[in-house]
Structure formats: C-alpha cells, structure tokens
Amino acid sequence: MQQRFTVLAVLVALVAAVQVGLGGDSQAIAWDNGLARTPPMGFNNWNATQCTPDFNAAMVESTADTLVSTGLAKSGYRYVNLDDCWAKSTRDDAGRLVPDPSRFPHGIKPIADYVHARGLKLGIYSSAGSTTCSAVGFPGGLGHEASDARQFADWGVDYLKYDNCNNRGVDARQRYTAMRDALAATHRPIVYSICEWGQSAPWQWASRVGNSWRTTADITDTWPSMQANFRQNVQLAGAAQPGHWNDPDLLEVGNGGMTAAEYRSQFSLWAMMAAPLLISTDLRRASNETLRVLGNSDLVAVDQDPLGRQAVQVVDTGGFNVLVKPLANGDRAVALFNETAAGSTIRTDLSAVGLPAGRYRSRDLWSGAVTEASGEIAAQVPAHSTVVYRLTAG
Ligand code: GLA
C-alpha cells in the first residue's frame, strides 16, 4: 500500500513537472497559506509615482477613496500596495524600519487603519537584499526577516512585495524562504509576492514559497515592453494554480505611453494569463476610458475564475496569437491577439480551443455582442488589439 502510494505520488509529481514543461523541481506539492486563491487585485503606486514626493500618505489615502468611489473596489481591486521609498534610509537604534517622516508623518499603522476602514487591504515593499532597488538604497530584509515581518504584521500589513536587489549572491530560494517562514511566524495572513524578475526560474520553485512570482524584467509604459513581458509569461501556463501565480508585472493602463487599443490588449492578456491585476496609474486623474478598461467585469471574471488556470497559447504565428483559458463552469475564454501593425482576421476553431463539436454562444467581452459559434471562431482584429470571446455551450 505504502509503495503504491509512493508510486502514485511520483506519478503526480511527474505529470505536474511535464505540465510546467520546464524541468527542475515539481511544483506538485505547493506551500499553502490559504491566500490568493484567485490572482491578487489592487493598486501599486510604482508606475504612477516611483519615488517622487507625490508618493505619500495623502496620495495613498485618496487612492483608497477613489477605488471605492469608482466602484473598482467592488470589482475586486482591494490591495493598496506601497512600493519602494516608503522608509527612511536607516534603521533605528533597535534595528527597526522607520517610515519616511516626510511621506508618512504618522507612520504606516494609520494608513493601514484608513484602508481597512474602507474594506481594503494594505501592501508594503521590501527587498530580499541588504538594501532596496532605489538608488538611495533603503534598508532591505536580508538578515532581518523575523523582525521586519513582525513589524509589518504589527502595522496591519496584508501583502508584501519582496524585491531582489543587493542580494549579496545568496541563493534566491534561501532568501525568499526565510521571509516566507518569518511571515508565517507572525500568524497574520499576508500575501507574499516574490519579485525576483524570473532570474532563477521561480516558476520552477516558488509555488512552495510564495503566492506569486515575477517572471520578467520591469515593465515600462511601451508596447515593446508589454509585448516582451507577455511573451515570456505566456509560456509558463503550467506553473499557475490557485494560491500561486505567474506575475508579468504591474498594469500600465492609463499611463499615456500606449494607445487605447494597446492598453485594452494588456488588460485582456493579463486577465487571460490569470495575472495579478495591479493598477499602477494615478487613479485620482484616471480618464473614463481607463476606468472602463480596469472595470471590465467580464474580463475581471476571466482573471478571477476559480478554476485558476492560466491561458495556454494555441496559435503563435507571425504576430497572430490565440490563447485559451478553461473556466470553472465549463466555458472557455478565447483571446485573438494581433501583434502586427495592420488589422487582420484571426481564425481558429472549436477543436483548436479544446471544445467538442456543437453550438456555442460566443460573447465578445469588450463589445458585449453575442454571436453563435459552431465551427470556426474568427474576428477582424485591428492592429495591436485583442478580441476576447467567452464561449458557452448551448
Ligand atoms: C525593482 C522592481 C520594481 C520596483 C522597483 C522599486 O525594479 O522590480 O517593480 O519595485 O524595484 O525600486
């Protein structure tokens, strides 16, 4: 019996390793803190403010208010995450982190209280190194894991983004595991977001350590950067599962460097890839178009689908892509993504998206138009655009 069980366990592990398709450790036995059963959603200030003086308590509080007043909080965006530069550049005499008094004069706890009072959650940032990534080099968590985690928990923090700068060559898995254990020891539920940029192939090990792991370099507000992060992340579908997500970095939607079609593509692709949806534009000044994109509840539902599968790319030819994401109720989300500079018809069919022959109701998740599909699935897709259909049997 014992032996049969072992054989079965090995088989399960092998299947998982093949699904990940990348060799290395199997992720079959994932660590589980019970959090992020669907990809985390919320806000992170980095792409909007970086370390400018605009990153401060007033900005964070009015962002929380805006999440509520625009209805985005109701749509699922609940983490309000502080990125780098929230701290003073030196620890206090007791080795504690000190919030920058010019940005957060009353500290972090009142900010946590403020967002909690609005039904939201607070996230914070540190690095698994001696200092963070900003040129100033704020204190990092390496060697301070237990006391930093305790401080975050005491402040009421609900999410930690843990970066990779100035890591002194210590093995990534070891550094990130130390903080995982320190967070667990606080007994506070804290989503653990590993920001290691894909350097040690975290999709092979990080489901045992964190709730998400960055798979790419930092995104910038440009089409080529968005494309590059998509291309890297889309290959890693086998590694995503409830509680553990590939993270192709923050949303750029609304920041002005891409066209409306390109932002709609980023949002569509991130939702298909079950990526964390972290808004990173100045929400206080967001246009109606930006709010419409971020608030597309049909695409949010695709991202947040409880089955927790990342879309698989079934077509990748000459800039034409088809992605397929199976959904918990048996529906399939199908994205037709045109990376080329000219409009074109993209075609696929039911068998290519894994559906048996039959009649399906096909709903366009941007226009709302409903058509019938019984063989071919096709759309005229403008340059740099993405059409997403949700196919329902019957
Ligand atoms: C790194 C991270 C970014 C951001 C900056 C902050 O570059 O990858 O997402 O957190 O550090 O300094």
Image (spheres, rainbow, N blue to C red):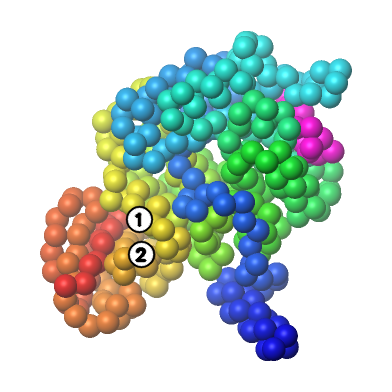
* Image label count: 2
Distance from Cα at disc 1 to Cα at disc 2: 7 Å
The tag on residue 302 is 1
Residue 138 shown in magenta: yes
Span of residues in magenta: 134-148
Q: Residue at the front extreme?
A: 1
Residue type at mark 2 is Leu
- Res. 87 visible in picture: yes
Rendered residue at 77%/28% (across/down): 139
Disc 1 under 8 Å from ligand 1? The reply is no
Quarter of the image where the N terminus is located: bottom right
| Residue 386 location (% of width, % of height) | 30, 55
Rendered residue at 72%/85% (across/down): 2
Does the CB distance between marks 1 and 2 fall below 8 Å? yes
Among numbered discs 1 and 2, the one appearing first in the sequence = 1
| Residue 284 location (% of width, % of height) | 38, 22
The secondary element bearing badge 1 is classed as: helix
Disc 2 under 8 Å from ligand 1? The reply is no
- Res. 47 visible in picture: no
| Residue 148 location (% of width, % of height) | 75, 32
Rendered residue at 67%/84% (across/down): 5
Q: Is residue 153 above or below residue 262?
A: above
Tell me the residue that label 2 is attached to.
327
